[in-house]
Amino acid sequence: MNITIADKPFPESGAIAVFSAAKKTLSPSAKALDKITKGALSRALKNANFSGSKGEILELISPGNGKLTRLVLVGVGDPENLTQRTVEEIGGAIAARLQTSGEKQLAVVVDRIKGSPVPEGAFAAHLASGLLIRSYRFDKYRTKEANKKKPSLKTVRILSHQSKQAKVIFAVAKKVISGVFLTRDLTSEPPNVVYPKSFAKIIKSLEADGLKVEILGEAALRKIGMRALLGVGQGSNFESQVVVMRWNGVPKAKMTKPVALIGKGVTFDTGGISIKPAEGMDLMKWDMGGAGIVVGAMKALAKRKAKANVVGIVGLVENMPSGTAQRPGDVVESLSGQTIEILNTDAEGRLVLADVLWYCQQKYKPQVMIDLATLTGAIIVTLGYDQYAGYFTDDDKIAEQLDAAGKITGDLVWRLPLSENYDKLINSQIADMQNIGGKGAGSITAAQFLKRFTNGVPWAHIDVAGVVWSAANKPLWEKGATGYGVRLLDRFVADNYEI
């Protein structure tokens, strides 16, 4: 979908969208269109169950003199409650409704909304962002989709008297959204297409955006000593990989320690010898969701030329059962030298992250580390789907930064506890620790496990198991990969670590 922002004039033909606040309070442009259509909009409002709530839509087909093909009235709700995210969701509602409507072009007329804390230019930009992000479809393998189900809407013009300001905001947003789309692509691809080496190859292509990319194969990983990570992948025919992405956006004279973003990339997770139930196992292609977020965020930072030094590291493995697979009862020595008793081979992501976290803080000396992983089903029990990611940190400053970034972007996070009593649950009888902590507090004990590999570096762990994939259409995505986390990390860096 091609989305542009321009100054008014007011259109009088084609498909046009205008706005209404709660209680059917029409915008000036909506009132003008009502006159042009000789009261068609007013008559429709009298007979329609439309109140102007956020994202609500009323459509009139070929109203008035016939020049208009479609008049779309869009609700914004209570203007005082508008935020960046809610405006994006309004744009998403327009895209979801009109994308397959048969219309090829749409003009959206933005007026100043009285009582809104979002200025007109920002409203136009965030509306455009919502339209764009909701237009995404992963349809490359749909070879027999009916034409009426395919997108028809190709061009959207957002018209505003504050177009200059809106263009500046939207230009940056588009670069970040390109990272969201990459994350969605990676998460959506089947596991015979995205496996460790092919994933690494995709990341390598991001050098075109200015990232420096280093790929470590199994020979290099053995030499380094990443035995915990390699143990997860030893049952697969696909070689494990670790990929390092570097964005150096700070001049050498002002050089700072990097922010580190670390992702779990299990490209397919059968559970290994502790095999998962067959039902739903196909969805385990998105167990690389944490790595997908990190890769999308690194692209976003590079595309918008963030003034920060950031290193992104992803551990890419496939967890399969075979004669060479890791067994429950095995003991493995991690890169840190700490030993781990494997009680469940389906608690594999923490083994991958353990080595990558240690490698990162040893080699790159980051000022802060954020890891992201689809780590536990327990986080879904706690927070459900499509709402919040759970996060863990003992650093209140990082907690405040993540909370703030989540509220602005709508990629929401919720803090959960760490404590010595939880940490004791992963002590092992025969090794330094075990990779599960028992029946209760599964997400917390997983975080306690990771904390043992942070070596005192300021750190947070974000468990994204409930937010990287959605079983339902939502305001900003079609059923499937959500792209959660890219904008969270981008905002986290932008607000706190850029010079």
Image (spheres, rainbow, N blue to C red):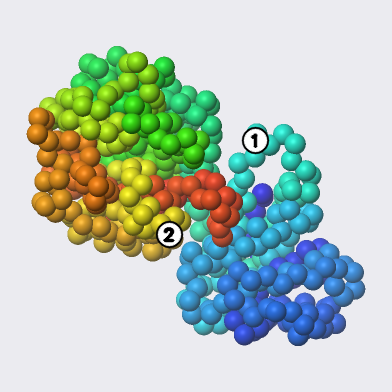
Q: Residue at x 56, y 54 (%)?
A: 472
Question: Residue 200 location, x and y as percent?
Answer: 42, 26
Query: Quick one: label 2 or label 1, which is nearer the N terminus?
Result: 1
* Of the pair 126 and 445, the residue shown nearer to us: 445
Check residue 140 in the rendering and tell me which mark sits there, or answer none. Answer: 1
Q: Is residue 28 left or right of residue 333?
A: right
| Secondary structure of the residue carrying numbered label 2 | loop
Point 25% across, 57% down: residue? 416
Q: Tell me which amino acid carries mark 1.
A: Lys
Is residue 252 visible in the rendered image? The answer is: no
Q: Which residue lies at the image location 11% right of the left edge and 52% below the top edge?
A: 421
* Foreground disc of the pair 2, 1: 2
The image position of residue 184, as x and y in percent, is 51, 42
- Amino acid at dot 2: Gln
In the image, 158: left or right of 149? left
Instruction: Provide residue 422's location: percent of width, then percent of height.
Output: 15, 50
Distance, label 2 to label 1, CA atoms, is 28 Å
Q: Residue furthest toward the right?
A: 65
Residue 57 as seen in the image, left or right of residue 281: right
58 or 273: nearer the eye? Answer: 273
Mark number, residue 387: 2
In which quadrant of the rendered view does residue 67 lie? bottom right
> Can the viewer see residue 189 in this picture?
yes
Q: Residue at x 86, y 68 (%)?
A: 62
Q: Is residue 446 left or right of residue 284?
A: left
Secondary-structure class at tag 1: loop
Taking 403 as reference, is 456 above or below it? Answer: above
Label 2 neighbour load within 10 Å: few <14, some 14-19, many 20+: some
Which one is nearer the viewer's eye here, 260 or 187? 187
Q: Is residue 50 above or below residue 432?
A: below
Examine the image and state in which quarter residue 126 appears.
Answer: bottom right
Q: Position of residue 474 (x, y in %)?
A: 56, 58
